[in-house]
Image (spheres, helix red, strand yellow):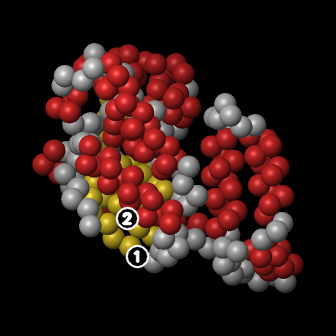
Amino acid sequence: MYQTLLTNKENGILTITVNRPDKLNALNKTVMEEISMAVDEVCKDETIKAAIITGAGPKSFVAGADISEFIGLTVEEGKALAKKGQDVFFKIENAPKPIIACVNGFALGGGCELAMACHFRLASDNAKFGQPEVNLGLLPGYGGTQRLTQLIGKGRAIELMITGNMIDAATALQFGLVNYVVPQEELHGKALSILQVVLTKAPIAVAKCIAAANAVFSEKQDGFDVEVNAFGECFATADKVEGTTAFLEKRKPVFKGE
């Protein structure tokens, strides 16, 4: 189905692997289009409850964009490229189902931006993060300037972007860029263990948690209003009835996403 991605669905979790190990899984036009298609699949397929995004091989998650595609672009073409990349990553960020990044090696440039678009990140102990675009006379264009600042704070984000320096997994954990650091062979298992817990929760409530958290950073929405409305809408769901009834009956709830 895909030229540059491998997909595997198991127990409701779709693992999406960027598969260009000879290019350290660099993002090119095809990869971006296929990631967009894969995220559409996650959102639309009712049998998929959550997703993991990772990279093929032990060295790299995604080591950046394919720079050869940048040569000769005009100002307007550069803007269009950035807008297209942002649109794909907004799709990940706003997906109603959890999408976790498993960062197994280099997450640089567009790769770091891809990881940051996911709802949260796990890193292997050999992971490296960075936005080295200044070395090319550029800046992050797929949302990196915004998400890095949101995740680690303005001072640290600006330092990373204007030096082009990389940080290791331990520093990324200290900065709050990743939730966990584990040995590489445990990375996928750790993500699955978290998602298996999530999949026992009410899917509508999970989706609304994601939407409300995203609203914190939206200039078009008042996050508190989003929360109030989402909270109220949950009262019309069968899952809310099941959840509250199960609590009072001292049993585990069985949610159906209704």
At 18% from the left and 25% from the top, the residue drawn is 71
Residue 181 appears in the rendering: no
Where residue 67 sits: x, y (%)?
20, 31
Residue found at x 55% / y 61%: 97
Whether residue 100 sits left or right of residue 32 in the image: it is right
Residue at left 78%, top 64%? 234
Circles 2 and 1 in contact, beta carbons < 8 Å:
yes
| Residue 239: % across, % down | 74, 74
User: From the viewer's perspective, is 88 left or right of 61?
Assistant: right
Give the CA distance from mark 2 to mark 1: 8 Å
Q: Which of the 4 quarters of the picture holds residue 240?
A: bottom right
Q: Which kind of residue does numbered mark 2 sit on?
A: Thr
Q: How many marks?
A: 2
Where is residue 135? Give x, y as percent: 26, 19
Residue behind mark 1: 10
Q: Is residue 87 left or right of residue 128?
A: right
165 relative to 234, above or below:
above
User: Is residue 253 depicted above or below 17 in this figure?
Assistant: below
